[in-house]
Image (cartoon, rainbow, N blue to C red):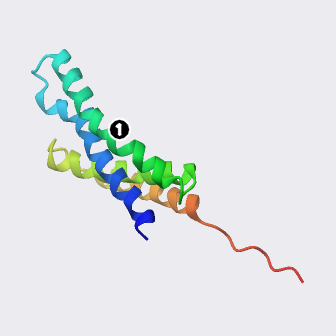
Amino acid sequence: MIERFLPLLLLLGSNIFMTFAWYGHLKYKGSPLLLAIVASWGIAFFEYSLMVPANRLGSNVYSVVQLKTIQEILTLVVFAGFSTWYLGQPLKWNHYAAFGLIVGAAFLMFYEPASPVTA
């Protein structure tokens, strides 16, 4: 059971670091660009420190395509919260609708149709 959930927790943590590395500096647009780059690069180290083991462990349970899909869904969830909470840019109905379509696509990624019964 832990082998199924540990990669998900690691991916979640990785996405939190990734979101701060990629978008956190937007709250401080007055700071020098070089500082933003160096700070983002430092934060990204922690992202990779979680992402690499998440993918390594997760590949024992999930396909690579499934891992990438999980990562993208977590990215959207983390980013939606980050955008609203940290950057003060709330999401609109069309953003939620677009996210819903992406979640539907993710469902299809994991859907395994039953094999037809042959007589």
Q: Nearer the viewer, residue 53 or 15?
A: 53
Q: Quadrant of the N terminus?
A: bottom left
On the image, the x and y values in percent for residue 74 come to 36, 53
Q: Is residue 71 above or below residue 113?
A: above
Q: Amino acid at mark 1?
A: Tyr
On the image, the x and y values in percent for residue 111 come to 59, 66
Residue drawn at x 23%, y 21% is: 37
Q: Is residue 2 above or below residue 101?
A: below
Dot 1: within a 10 Å radius of its alpha carbon, few (fewer than 14), some, or many (20 or more) residues? some
On the image, the x and y values in percent for residue 3 come to 44, 63
Residue drawn at x 64%, y 67% is: 112
Residue drawn at x 50%, y 60% is: 104
Lateral position of residue 76 relative to residue 33, left or right: right
On the image, the x and y values in percent for residue 64 come to 56, 49
Secondary structure beneath disc 1?
helix
* Tag 1 residue: 48
